[in-house]
Amino acid sequence: MATLCTLAVWCDDLLLLHIMGIELDVTGLKKQYPEKFYIVTANHQSWNDILILQHLFNRRAPVLKFLVKREVIYLPLVGLICWAYGYPFLRRYAVKGRKGEGEQRHRDLAVLEKAFDRFMRYPGTVINFVEGTRFTPAKARRQKSPYKYLLKPKAGGLTTMLGLLGDRVGGVIDVTIVYDGEDPTFCL
């Protein structure tokens, strides 16, 4: 599985770095992270964030694993890839005000527990977008975010992961992605 992931990231790197011509300026990242289980926290502005995180941690840390919202399964190719990699699809019932939030929240927790049991068979790196969604100026205004380019972070997902994984976590790696210029997009 790790070899397949490494090959897939190499293909993504061709798109990101060579076809799209994105240049990365990276500071503070260690050369290697030992074979443990890590959680990476990051802000989320674009689908490009996923490609960038894959590039940054490929062959540097154990294989990246994502928690994805249920709607992603319906995206052509992307949903199939997430399903094939065994990423858990969450309905995010924890969002306040959703009908039946109390009992439904337990479904997401059960999905996470099952996924982490699977993840823990081999060292891995789980990505947690702490804002819970991609940044847009409209979302920031609605939320009254005190930040210029970030939404207010949500601690629930990270707290849940740390609670489920406990002392099996080798560390939490904080990543901030900043784009120079216009909003990032897949469009060439």
Image (tube, grey):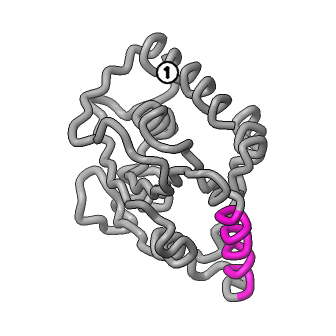
Residue 168 at least partly seen: yes
* In the foreground, 135 or 54: 54
Query: Pointer 1: residues within 10 angstroms few (<14), some, or many (20+)?
Result: some
Secondary structure at numbered mark 1: helix
Residue drawn at (42%, 58%) of the image: 139
Position of 186 relative to 35 (above/below): above
Q: Would you say the magenta stretch is mainly helix, strand or loop?
A: helix
The picture places residue 8, in percent across and down from the top left corner, at: 62, 26
Residue 48 at least partly seen: no
In this rendering, position of residue 160 left or right of residue 18: right
Position of 165 relative to 7 (above/below): below
According to the picture, the residue beneath numbered tag 1 turns out to be 13
Residue drawn at (50%, 75%) of the image: 166
Residue 113: image quadrant is bottom right
Residue 91: image quadrant is bottom right
Give the residue type at disc 1: Asp
Which quadrant, please, contains the N terminus? top right
The picture places residue 136, in percent across and down from the top left corner, at: 40, 50
Q: Bounds of the magenta span?
A: 103-117
* In the foreground, 32 or 184: 32
Q: Furthest-top residue in view?
A: 19
Q: Is residue 94 magenta?
A: no
* In the foreground, 135 or 168: 168
* In the foreground, 34 or 169: 34
Residue drawn at (38%, 60%) of the image: 172
In this rendering, position of residue 27 left or right of residue 50: left
